[in-house]
Image (spheres, rainbow, N blue to C red):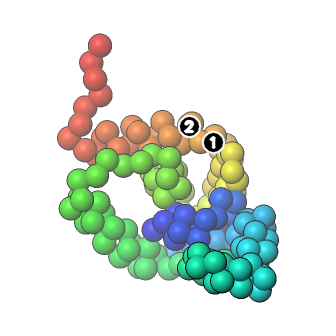
Amino acid sequence: MIGQELATLGVDSFNLAKRGGNYTVWIENTKFKQAVAEDSTFAKRLMRTFLGDDPPPAPEIPDVMHFASPQVLWKDVERQFHRKASHETADLNELSLLLRALGDFLDRNRADDFNLFWSKNSAKVVFGDREENFNFLNLYNMGTRMYLKRSSRRPLQR
C-alpha cells in the first residue's frame, strides 16, 4: 500500500521508518519535486493551454507521509482482493512489489521496528542489530520466489 502510494507520486528515493504500528516516510526525491515545480510555471501552463495540450496538474509531493497499521492492512486486503479479481500477472519491477518482497523478508526475520533507506539503485534496511543491503535484482528475485510460492504456479522443471 505504501509502495503504491509512493509510485503514484513518482517517488524513487525515500526513507521509511516503522515504529510499533506506525510508518513514517520521508521523501527525498528533490529532483522530481524540482521538475514538478519547474513544469508548472505560469508560462508553460499558458502555452499548454493556448496550444490545447494541457495535462492534468502534477501531484503535490509531501515531505513526510504517515501511515498507521490498520490503514495499511485494510488497503492491502482491499488491493489483494482486486489483484485476485483481475487475474493479472504481477509486474515485479513495480515499487510496490519490490517493497512487498522486502516486507516479506522483514516478516520472516521478525523485524518489528526497522529503518529503510530506498534509492534509485539500492535499498538498505536496518533492524535490531542487523543491516542488510539489497540491489533491485536481489529484490526482484525475492519477489519472484514470493510470487511463485503464493500462487499455484510452480517453477519450470529442466
- At a point 46% along the width and 53% down the height, the residue shown is 97
- At a point 67% along the width and 46% down the height, the residue shown is 122
Q: Position of residue 132 (x, y in %)?
A: 65, 44
Q: Is residue 52 left or right of residue 90?
A: right
Count of labels in the image: 2
Q: Amino acid at mark 2?
A: Asn
Nearest the eye: 24 or 64: 64
Quarter of the image containing the C terminus?
top left
Quarter residue 28 falls in: bottom right
Mark 2 crowd level (few <14, some 14–19, many ≥20, 10 Å Cα): some
* Secondary element type, mark 2: helix
For the question of whether residue 21 can be seen, the reply is yes
Q: Position of residue 55 (x, y in %)?
A: 57, 76
Mark carried by residue 138: 2
Quarter residue 147 falls in: top left
Q: Is residue 69 left or right of residue 124?
A: left
Q: CA distance from mark 2 to mark 1?
A: 6 Å
- At a point 45% along the width and 68% down the height, the residue shown is 1
Q: In the rendered view, would you say 83 is above or below 34?
A: above
Q: Are marks 2 and 1 in contact (CB under 8 Å)?
A: yes
Q: Position of residue 108 (x, y in %)?
A: 45, 48
Q: Residue furthest front?
A: 51
Q: Amino acid at mark 1?
A: Phe
Residue linked to disc 1: 134
